[in-house]
Image (spheres, grey):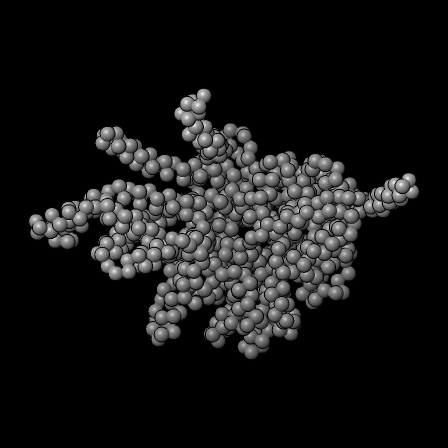
Amino acid sequence: MFYWLQKNLPKIVIAPSFAVILWFVYGFILWTIYISFTNSKMLPRYDFVGLKQHIRLWSQWRWYNAVENLLIFTVLFIAICIIIGIFLSILLDQKIRAEGFLRTVYLYPMALSFIVTGTAWKWILNPTMGIQKLVRDWGFTDFTFDWLVNRDMSIYTIVIAAVWQSSGFVMALFLAGLRSIDDEIIKAAKIDGASLYSIYITIILPMLRPVFMSAIVILLHISIKSYDLVIALTAGGPGTSSDMPAVYMTQMAFHRSEIALASASAVMMFLTILAIVVPYLYSELRRQDANR
Amino acid sequence: MYKQVLKISAGFILAAGISASPAFAGGEAEVLHWWTSGGEAKALKVLKDDFAKNGGTWKDMPVAGGGGDAAMVTLKARIVSGDPPTAAQIKGPTIQEYDDEGVVGPYNIHSVATAENWDALLSPQVANHMKCDGFTKYCAAPVNIHRIDWFWANKKVLDANGLKMPTSWPEFNAAATKLKAAGIIPFAHGGQPWQDATVFEAVAIGIGGNDFYRKAIMELDLDALGGSTMVKVFDQMRILQGFTDEGMPGRDWNVATGMVMNGKAAFQIMGDWAKGEFANAGLKPGIDYYCLPTPSNHGYLYNVDSFIFYSMKGENKIEGQKLLASLMMGKNFQKVFNLYKGSIPARLDVPMDEFDMCAKGSAADLNYAAMTGGLLPSFAHGMALKLAQKGAIQDVVTEHFNSKMSSKEAASRLVRAVKDTL
């Protein structure tokens, strides 16, 4: 009896949370998928109407607009975050003084919620009281920086705020990666006469491949579910120019009584994540198997 | 000992007798609302006190957060789980949408409404908004009427530039051009979708007329939505956009009102809740600021706040619903509430002596518009259309107002967007 308990205790302890997650995460994913095939308006209904809502979704310019914005945002957000993150982490890795302090400075934006970040940047970028006004008051009266209120540029203000928030985190990831690399490798390369630049480009960064992967996956899901930052910074505006799928989904579900349509858009977001995460997990797991 | 028992039991009987004397004894109400700030909270307290005075138990369920978005989520969750609140702040066609979902019948408050003869106390159009089951049975109670198509203007700014309140849109455009040249922001506006839609509907009844509004927005006639009149409405929207300032996108409505108050800007189009901002700053209508309807042929865009009463389990709660409905329609509550809220009573027989000139004007215009067919439900505030169609129109309006889209393109997009939701 005691032996049995000892053997199975972990399973027993894990079982309740496993059951809860099974139901409240995976069960509700299935429920959402089913709702997206119904005619639900204000409250959920269970009448099956096939692909109607998905066809409606993909015939709306507002949805295309949201998807396009998501693509712009995701690509820029991930790329800039990683570039800045690597650059900062390499600088910090040069055994400088007060590193702990500087690390905290860069990491600190991560401690703020996206709502705070969004509100702060809304004021900074507002042309009538932020950067534009400041520079104009200095005497450069022609200076214009109106991205926040310019519909062609508003999506980039979201990129700016998101990068400001997350690049410190990426820096921390890469710093940890750099620390795990053996100094001997760098010393050996230096003896062979390699420049510092080529050491980093050809040796160290390729060795950080797992860090790249985890950074991308973490940033990717932040970007696909980005909602609070958009709401706080631009609320999807001007017009609908900085709309995103998550904003679209919330509006349809809770403001427009279009639960089925909202579910269809949620399914699309889910599939996007799936399309990226599954191949990644697959390749990672296969590599683990190969290493065994 | 025996005497003491007698005393206590007598006390009980007496107490029961007293509390049973009002018509709806011991009712219980849980009211979901989002009136949590300033004047609105004060206004609602009137109802709470009334309810308690009549022996009811009030369970407040305020859900804070802009215009009830958070409240909607809470409400739907409660309904789906089979435990709706006694009353909820729901208005417009959404009332009938809930009825279609089958969560309102058997219309608990209808008996109160017939007993108090609400049909005679409300204008027929307002009464219709409150009825379910094919507009036959009362299922909601109105508390106020807000007018949407107001021009709020800074009198000192207009006087200084030798201008009067415009009575037509070309007159407004001329006045605004002059103000712009004088370095004043002619049109204070907050670029949020609902504010864009608010301006749009005022322009639609002004440029297009009452019948056009009825056909295009209320009946969703596709020819009217994409026709030449609609193009003209969008043209005027484009002109208005030229009168706004750079900080417009995303600005809150009360910030825009503040710009009118301190003379940075001249005009704002906003519902009569804007009056509260002027009143808080100690400004007087007619002396410091103007409150006049936007130019139209005696059109009147209304927004009626109301509470819906869902189907309930438990006699106690049904009694609570009945008491609440009766109090909401009570003369005293309708007067005091609207004095705080800035709107006018939904009930027609409330004396208007204590109200200010804006509210008096609104009440007079309402009666005239009701007779001449200009009394129209506001689409921007969810009175004219189901939420899906309202949202579709609002998307196009805000997209047009915040871009360089041509008026023709906007009109044809409007047709496409509305078609998709039908």
- Quarter of the N terminus of chain A within the rendering: top left
Asked whether the viewer can see residue B88, the reply is: yes
**The one of B65 and A71 positioned closer to us in this rendering:** B65
Name above or below for residue A202 compared with residue B80: below
**Could you tell me residue A54's position as x and y percent?**
44, 36
Q: Is residue B170 above or below residue A71?
A: below
Which residue sits at x=38%, y=56%?
A109
Residue pushed farthest left? A192
Q: Is residue A263 left or right of residue B215?
A: left
Query: Which corner quadrant of the image does residue A3 belong to?
Result: top left
Image quadrant occupied by the C terminus of chain A: top left
- At 43% from the left and 28% from the top, the residue drawn is A9
Position of B152 relative to A84 (above/below): below
Would you say A274 lies left or right of B336 here? left
| Residue A241 visible in rendering | no
Could you tell me which residue is drawn at 40 percent across and 69 percent down? Answer: A133
